[in-house]
Image (cartoon, grey):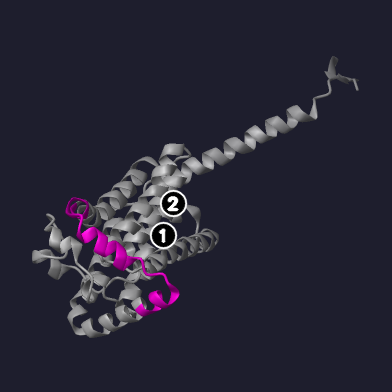
């Protein structure tokens, strides 16, 4: 349609504008507004808050570790109960893997170094990289990692479980490999909680790394590494005699629970507290 109107002595012609063009312009405006909103809230959190969280988790872990000698027999009893349950369910691969690894010293040493160091290096390195490069993903990933450790510490306190290596018939592959920086021998052994098999935080942290890598990249090789990492971790913790299969399942469940609770809490928090305050923590 064409409409001619007189506007103060001048003629203005109204031309029809396609609906698709109007929708495109409106979509661009809305998209620009959303992009600006995301840019406004995506900032790195204050580093000292994260440092305090790490110190607090270490303090709680140390308290529980100091009580380990008083709960030794209780933890051994729980471990024997788990092993009996696994054997009743025919889900007890740890003994066969442990026996096999005992006779492969080079592989045993490699898996021992992996067990002692990979979960710290990979997890904390990945967390630092996300903080530096992907601030938009950092907060939910950090919060879920902290929460899964809190859940793990709660179970360590309420239900101490000794690892298989402390039971008759199993071998402590890590200790016999004499790896540098081992938490099973020397001065570091007294600083570690030896009765914290359930849940496996090695497995929980590995699953968290899988989640983080999956969200960071859609490249095939990155996602292949993301899947392979917890699989190798599962073999390492079972074969070295440090965890039961049920510990691994519990570690995966801990990660899942932490992620779900973090997402639920994040949604509630954003509704109750102004976004500017939430983005600063």
Of residues 111 and 132, the one drawn nearer to the viewer in this rendering: 111
In the picture, the disc for residue 49 is none
Contact between marks 1 and 2 (CB within 8 A): the answer is: yes
Mark closer to the observer (1, 2): 2
What residue sits 36% from the left and 50% below the top? 229
Residue that lies at the very extreme toward the top in this rendered image: 10
Q: What stretch is highlighted in magenta?
A: 84-109
- In the rendered image, residue 119, in percent from the top left (x then y), is placed at 28, 55
In the picture, the disc for residue 144 is 1
In this picture, residue 214 sits left or right of residue 239: right
Q: Which of marks 1 and 2 is nearer the N terminus?
A: 1
205 magenta-colored: no
In the picture, the disc for residue 211 is 2
In this picture, residue 258 sits left or right of residue 52: right
Q: In which quarter of the image is residue 281?
A: bottom left
Of residues 1 and 203, the one drawn nearer to the viewer in this rendering: 203
Describe the element under mark 2 as helix, strand or loop.
helix
Q: As displayed, is residue 123 above or below residue 251?
A: above
- In the rendered image, residue 209, in percent from the top left (x then y), is placed at 38, 51
User: What's the distance in space between the residues labelled 1 and 2, CA to CA?
Assistant: 11 Å
Tell me, yes or no, if residue 62 can be seen here.
yes
């Amino acid at each position: 349609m064409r409409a001619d109107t007189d506007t103060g002595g001048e003629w203005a012609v109204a031309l029809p504008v396609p609906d698709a063009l109007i929708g495109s312009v409106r979509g661009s405006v809305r998209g620009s507004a959303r992009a600006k909103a995301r840019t406004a809230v995506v900032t790195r959190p204050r580093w000292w808050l994260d440092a305090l969280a790490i110190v607090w988790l270490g303090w709680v872990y140390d308290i529980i570790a100091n009580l380990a000698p008083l709960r030794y027999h209780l933890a051994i009893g729980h471990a024997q109960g788990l092993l009996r349950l696994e054997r009743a369910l025919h889900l007890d691969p740890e003994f066969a893997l442990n026996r096999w690894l005992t006779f492969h010293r080079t592989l045993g040493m490699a898996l021992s170094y992996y067990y002692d160091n990979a979960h710290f290096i990979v997890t904390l390195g990945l967390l630092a990289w996300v903080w530096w490069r992907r601030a938009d993903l950092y907060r939910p990933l950090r919060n879920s990692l902290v929460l899964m450790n809190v859940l793990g510490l709660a179970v360590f306190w309420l239900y101490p479980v000794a690892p298989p290596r402390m039971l008759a018939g199993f071998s402590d592959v890590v200790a016999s490999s004499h790896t540098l920086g081992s938490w099973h021998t020397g001065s570091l052994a007294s600083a570690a909680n030896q009765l914290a098999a359930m849940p496996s935080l090695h497995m929980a942290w590995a699953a968290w790394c899988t989640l983080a890598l999956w969200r960071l990249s859609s490249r095939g090789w990155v996602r292949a590494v993301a899947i392979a990492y917890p699989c190798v971790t599962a073999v390492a913790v079972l074969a070295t005699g440090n965890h039961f299969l049920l510990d691994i399942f519990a570690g995966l469940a801990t990660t899942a629970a932490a992620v779900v609770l973090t997402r639920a809490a994040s949604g509630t928090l954003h509704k109750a507290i102004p976004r500017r305050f939430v983005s600063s923590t």
